[in-house]
Image (tube, rainbow, N blue to C red):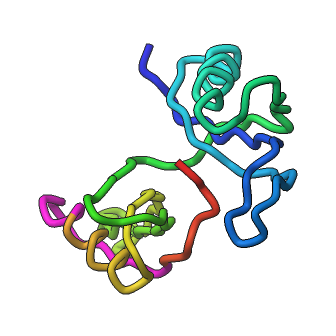
Amino acid sequence: MSAIWYECKVKYRKFDEATAAHKVKTEPFLVDAISYTEAESRITEEMVAYISEGEEIKITNIKVANYAEIHPFENTDRWFKSRVSLIAFDEESGKERKTNMYLLVQANDVKEAYENTVTTMKDTMGEYTIPAVSESPIMD
């Protein structure tokens, strides 16, 4: 059984450097796991690095993320969701058929995210288009 990506929404007290105060935030994180139970366990373990001693976290939602692939890039600090449409020719109907897949790509801005998506797709056999790239709220 292969791991699946789960998006976990976590509510916790986070130190806000701009105001020098702790604020309650709800942020999405991504973990790979083989079940919801393992995803809950993994995110709880990972969040220890983000909270002060004695602080609590609350997992408000866990759902299967629809990402086909995750692509981190060095010297980048944000995540972007790229929709890639794979184009296939249907011999029977004689029409083009598009199948969408979503990639999570790290970059510093939308332009770089598009370029990084093209880089990850360079070994793809066949045609594709990238109809959408948008910033993702994923933290890590």
| Quadrant where the image shows the N terminus | top left
Pick the front one: 14 or 69: 14
Residue 15: x %, y % from top left: 73, 53
Residue 26: x %, y % from top left: 81, 51
Asked if residue 7 lies left or right of residue 13, the reply is left
Residue 12: x %, y % from top left: 81, 41
Q: Residue furthest bottom?
A: 111
Pick the front one: 31 or 51: 51
Asked if residue 56 lies left or right of residue 73, the reply is right
- Magenta residues span 120-132
Pick the front one: 21 or 117: 21
Q: Residue at x 18, y 60 (%)?
A: 124
Q: Residue at x 70, y 38 (%)?
A: 8
Q: Residue at x 75, y 35 (%)?
A: 62
Give yes or no for residue 126 being in the magenta stretch.
Answer: yes
Q: Is residue 66 above or below residue 58?
A: below
Residue 25: x %, y % from top left: 82, 53
Q: Is residue 61 above or below residue 104?
A: above
Q: Is residue 15 above or below residue 76?
A: above
Q: Is residue 64 above or below residue 109?
A: above
Asked if residue 140 lies left or right of residue 89, the reply is right
